[in-house]
Amino acid sequence: AQTVTQSQPEMSVQEAETVTLSCTYDTSESNYYLFWYKQPPSRQMILVIRQEAYKQQNATENRFSVNFQKAAKSFSLKISDSQLGDTAMYFCALNSLPQGAQKLVFGQGTRLTINP
Amino acid sequence: DVKVTQSSRYLVKRTGEKVFLECVQDMDHENMFWYRQDPGLGLRLIYFSYDVKMKEKGDIPEGYSVSREKKERFSLILESASTNQTSMYLCASSLGFREQQFFGPGTRLTVL
């Protein structure tokens, strides 16, 4: 079975600080995709970053980067120079092929607050 | 930009009522999904569809059904609403299963 675990229900940092959100997962497949989604308050969920498991290089998108540790089954999200607009729920998700090919499995979410 | 819309942002229904939640996407995506979001549980998949008139059960299909008569529209039906179905319902669509999903704004359903 596929599982995703986010062990930090809530986090809070000051604006401009760097923050790292943790995610661990479990799958027996070697080919899979990992995602971080962001859900701002009262707004739609959007993709932050996507990582393909067979790519060793960590994905980056501007201030957002991941630390993908395949052996440890860890996929943490680092937000650099945090901004007030980064305040949101963050969800880690796994799509594991061919098992569960048709669906994403989400973690419980981390509520991140950026304080001015 | 991909746009996924849901028929209502807030909905209040009575126990036993039949409830329809509508979702429309405008990007010709093959795949559409219905999730429910509950605090501490993340998103859980109710049903998904990979083509018109095709549907597959997700992790928590009990008490729900779906309909996809047109490619752009995916409906979630609560045949007889119960209080434990009070939740946030999110619709999503994607071009492929390995691709990102685009989400609607959500419908917060309260069943009294």
Image (tube, rainbow, N blue to C red):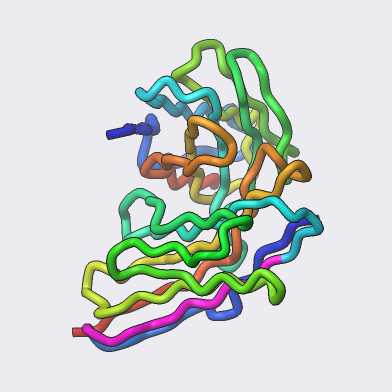
Horizontal side of residue B56 vs B9, given as left or right: right
In the displayed structure, B67 sits above or below A13; it is: above
The verdict on residue A88 being magenta is no
Left/right placement of residue A48 relative to residue B15 reads left
> Image quadrant of residue A49?
bottom left
Q: Is residue B84 above or below residue B91?
A: below
Residue under the image location 38 percent in, 30 percent down = B7
Image position, residue A13 (x, y; %): 32, 87
Left or right of A87? Residue B97 is: right
Nearer to the camera, B42 or A97: A97
- Quarter of the rendering occupied by the N terminus of chain A: bottom right
Location of residue B97 in the rendering, given as x and y in whole percent from the top left corner? 59, 37
Image point (57%, 48%), residue name? B36
Evaluate whether residue B84 shows in this view: no
Q: Quadrant of residue A64?
A: bottom left
Foreground of the two, A21 or A80: A80
Residue A70 placement (x, y as % from top left): 66, 69
Residue at the (33%, 33%) spot, across then down: B2
Magenta-highlighted residues: A16-25
Give the residue drawn at x 35%, y 75%. A79
The quadrant of the image that shows the C terminus of chain A is: bottom left
